[in-house]
Image (spheres, grey):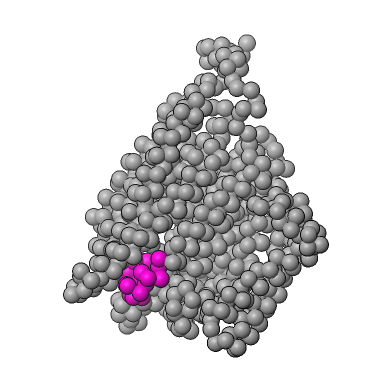
Amino acid sequence: MNRNHPPGFRQARHRAAANAPHPSHMPQAPSSKSFLVQGSILAAAGIIVRFIGLLYKIPMTRALGKAGIGYYNTAYEIYNIGLILSSYSLPLAISKLIAGKRVRKQYQDAKRVFRSGMIFGLTVGSLMALFLFFEADSITAQIFHSPGSALPLKVMAPTILVFSVMGVIRGYFQGLGNMIPTSLSQIIEQVVNAVVSIAASYTFMKWFAQRETPESYGAAGGTLGTLSGAVAAFLFLLFLLYLYRKSHSRMLRRPQAIPVESWTAVYAGLFLTLTPIILSQFVYQLSGTVDNALFGWIMSEKGLTEKERMSLLGVYGGEYRLLSNVPVAIASSLGASMIPSIVNSRSQRKLSEVHHKIRITIKFNMLIAIPCAVGMGVLAAPIMHMIFHDDSELSANLMRIGALAVVFFSLSTVTNAVLQSIDRMRQSVTHSAISLAIHIGLVYVMLKHWDWNVYGLVAGNVTFALVVCVLNWISIGRALRYRQEVMTTFFLPLFASVLMGAVALGAYTGVYALTKTISLAMAVSVPLAMVTYGVLIIFLKAVTEEELAEMPFGRKMVALCRKARLM
């Protein structure tokens, strides 16, 4: 008899064995296809959310003007830092912990993780919301040189508390391998956000038109939409928890073969999991806030007024970064779905399965991110015209220069998720910190000494993600003895994308020369480019039939390729 076992352990183990469900009824570790499908559900929701974001930002920008969007984006950057420090990482941490408990059949411990997460979310979310609300005036004026951003920040501050609690619920569902609740709640959140933001922006601009900075009040209308959307999504998730209460209760009441962890151990595990993720996300996301602060400080010294600075930041943040973040949503979603899946595989010591999941996720991501970057760069001017009605050379140049960031941010997001899933989160923090230090130095020099103006922010955006990619890549290789296949993951998709870009530009130029209609030229060139790229990656054998079958809707695409005699 093992003297180290606590009293009653053997009896508890025998009871657990007798009462445990048949293995076929137990939750299994997701296959690579399963987590890709779940990740694609999240990715689809992310794309829909970003698309809705683009749609509602168009009338909102018209209502607020570039200065108003500048106030809105500055307030949002500050709010985003508060969200990261308090609750942004809760879904990742909760999903990782619950996935680990499930695979080890520690059902009571999973229940305690959920409850401890709720208490943590309520406490930290409340403190951060109160801090931002009462300190909004000093933060916006002293750090960002934008007093007009204080009001929209105050309106948005309570959203952090809502997101804190909602993040725990999303993480719980993700830990169970179900991405649908998170996906649906994100769509509901964005729809309500869009409706309220547009209506409130127009309304507040009219109500406060006689004030000194009506754009600030209009931006507060936009942030009211953020709060309203979060509340709507939270209520939806509560409703889902109510619907699933019986099936979840049955799972959480299953006996476990080892003693239940103490609440102290559960909180310690949550804290140890959350802290490096929070630090990693905080440093990773801090670059945008640092950019706004540096730009406000240096450009004000160079004589630009607050409205002039906010107008430039409105183009940079409200147009370029908003649009370039759309493809990155796919990487974020695949990364979120990959973490519980890799935790399951590592817990079962299936290293080859871990390698396969990383490889197929990165490859699937690059097959999408690379052509998106090329397409955005080649068709930058018509894209900016169609989406934002902005024909300025500035907006088109920002997209041309910064399109490369789509690839680097997508890759760095996925590799960060890999490091988090294999308990190398400290390295993720270190890499982001090193990249941020380099980023700050470069942006300072480009703004202060080289007079690159807002172009310096775009260049810094690209280099920040690039450095994170390189460092993450080295760490993953060392930790897992893993190397990504380079030719079919990067070079062939890039070659196909360059040819696709040439076709897109040629088709657009030709149709526009004949019709003088941008929308018609885009309607012809974009689908033609997509078909060209799809045919090229099959023809060049960048994707095998087996890999394509693993991807979402892969079997249908394989059947289509066979009919077209491409496979």
When the figure is inspected, residue 459 is found, relative to residue 510, above or below; the finding is above
Which quadrant: the C terminus?
bottom right
Horizontal and vertical percent position of residue 468: 57, 60
Question: Residue 500, located in which quarter of the rendered image?
Answer: bottom right
> Is 179 left or right of 215, judged from the image as shown?
right
Which residue does the image show at 71% across and 56% down from the upper left?
A: 557
- Number of dots carrying numbers: 0
Horizontal and vertical percent position of residue 180: 51, 45
Residue at the limit of the structure toward the left, as seen here: 210
> Is 432 left or right of 304, judged from the image as shown?
right
Q: Nearest the camera: 560 or 392? A: 560
Q: Nearest the camera: 307 or 235? A: 235
Which residue does the image show at 66% across and 73% down from the upper left?
A: 528
Query: What main secondary structure does the magenta stretch of the protein show?
Result: helix
Which residue does the image show at 39% across and 48% down from the upper left?
A: 233
Q: Is residue 65 magenta?
A: yes
Is residue 356 visible to the viewer in this orientation of the structure?
yes
Which quadrant: the N terminus?
top right
Q: Nearest the camera: 140 or 325? A: 325
When the figure is inspected, residue 437 is found, relative to residue 108, above or below; the finding is below
Which residue does the image show at 44% across and 75% down from the upper left?
A: 388
Horizontal and vertical percent position of residue 527: 63, 71
> Is 484 left or right of 111, judged from the image as shown?
right
Magenta residues span 56-75
When the figure is inspected, residue 5 is found, relative to residue 169, above or below; the finding is above
Question: Residue 544, located in which quarter of the rendered image?
Answer: bottom right
Is residue 427 visible to the viewer in this orientation of the structure?
no
Horizontal and vertical percent position of residue 69: 35, 70
